[in-house]
Image (tube, helix red, strand yellow):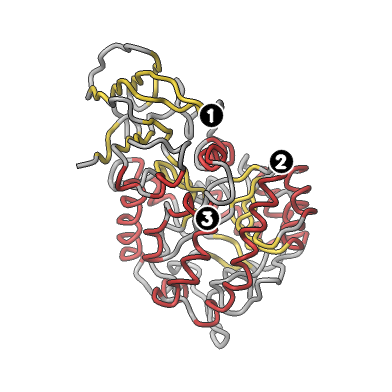
Amino acid sequence: MSGSLVLRNGAVLDVDGGSYREADIRIVDGRIVEIDRAVATGDGPDVDLRGGYVLPGLIDAHVHVMAATADLGLLRAWSPHYAAAHAAREMGRMLDRGFTTVRDTGGADFGLADAQGEGLIRGPRLLFCGKAISQTGGHGDERPRGALAVDPWAVGLSQLADGVDAVRVAARHELRRGANHLKVMASGGVASPTDRVDSTGYSDEELRAVVEEAQAANRYVAAHAYTARAVDRALRAGVRSIEHGNLIDEGSVRLLLEHDAFLVPNLVTYWALHELGRQHGLSEESWRKVADVLDGGYRSLELAARAGVQIAYGTDLLGDMRQYQSREFEIRADLQPAMDIIRSATTVGAQLVGMAGEIGCLAPGAFGDLIVLDADPLADVRVLAWPHRFRLVAQGGEIVRRAG
């Protein structure tokens, strides 16, 4: 997506500085070229914002665009074409919520990313890992206990690999297909049928093998991990981002800081799974696991935020629960300052995915991704939880949604 656009008389947020300035924005061929007063007229639309609040396009660093149901075992029986149609619809909805870039952490591949990049489907810029890598019986093993066979080509969020050689092959396979990052299941989880939340995943040698393969390709590894034990093992192996981290301790926080790593909490998904999960295909057994991590997520976020850990915005919602993607802003409002929450969904997310200066900011050279609001999110960040009230959303210099 590459357009030209001039926006005038906006209150433009400097995310790093935490303040607004009155300015116009000129976007040419999808990139911001000028932010100043009284910029020249361009070749595209010229819009007077009348003092509207202008923020960078939002970044969700933990989505599953292919997870159209919370019953992940059922997903494997779907036609990939049917699953892709669901994904395309959800990507359009994400864009309408102001998320102009998302990081998929299991399920999406180069097909959806290319389709979005070529304008075949509406949606956020899609950064993908392919299928997450899981040990047999780990969080990515979605088979019920009695099942034996697994189809590696079926629709799903994960693949199974056991042993150092096998995880290297799995990592290389996803990197060959263009993965922006790799995802490894370093602990048990909620939505998987045969593991415990407090279990670890993979040996130290297997974790290091995945990291080595990612680093050789100038990519990085994200790790699904809940407990301090699992998180600490992943960080020592060289993982760049911890997904969830609901049960970390002060030692884990020190390691996050020491390794310059990122934490991606997903508080909204535990609220949604607890309140709505069973209505959307979550098994009774998985629903009972939610209680193990629900309260811990709030404590872990507070602990990490107080220490200055780099915290990105992520949601991890499944099925129709993805409609609550923006509610994470509302939940975090009770735990973090507004500016920190905004940074988590903009500059911190951009740093995590290696695109600082291109996304998550309003500056010359960055993509022309932005949202415009009537209310000031620094005064109340909860306004970001109501995207239907956004005045407009632009991506790559094209207005993709406008109020009214």
- Residue picked out by circle 3: 105
Q: Residue 115, can we see it?
A: no
Task: Answer with mark 2 or mark 3, whichever residue precedes in sequence.
Answer: 3
Q: Hey, which residue is sitting farthest left in the picture?
A: 404
The Cα–Cα distance between marks 2 and 1, rounded to whole angstroms, is 22 Å
Secondary structure type for disc 2: loop
Q: Mark 3 and mark 2 in contact (Cβ < 8 Å)?
A: no
Q: Residue 161, can we see it?
A: yes
Residue 365: percent from left, percent from top = 45, 22
Task: Answer with mark 2 or mark 1, whichever residue precedes in sequence.
Answer: 1
**As rendered, which of 369 and 88 lies closer to the eye?**
369
**Which corner quadrant of the image does residue 134 belong to?**
bottom right
Q: Hey, which residue is sitting farthest front in the picture?
A: 379
Residue 314: percent from left, percent from top = 52, 52
**As rendered, which of 312 and 403 lies closer to the eye?**
403
Kind of residue at badge 3: Thr
**Which corner quadrant of the image does residue 55 belong to?**
top left
Q: Where, quadrant-wise, is the C terminus in this rendering?
A: top left
**As rendered, which of 274 and 134 lies closer to the eye?**
274
Secondary structure type for disc 1: loop
Relative placement, left or right, of 5 versus 267 is: left
- Residue picked out by circle 1: 18
- Residue at point 28% right, 25% down? 50
Relative placement, left or right, of 325 versus 6 is: right
- Residue at point 59% right, 75% down? 289
- Residue picked out by circle 2: 260
Residue 161: percent from left, percent from top = 63, 66
Kind of residue at badge 2: Asp
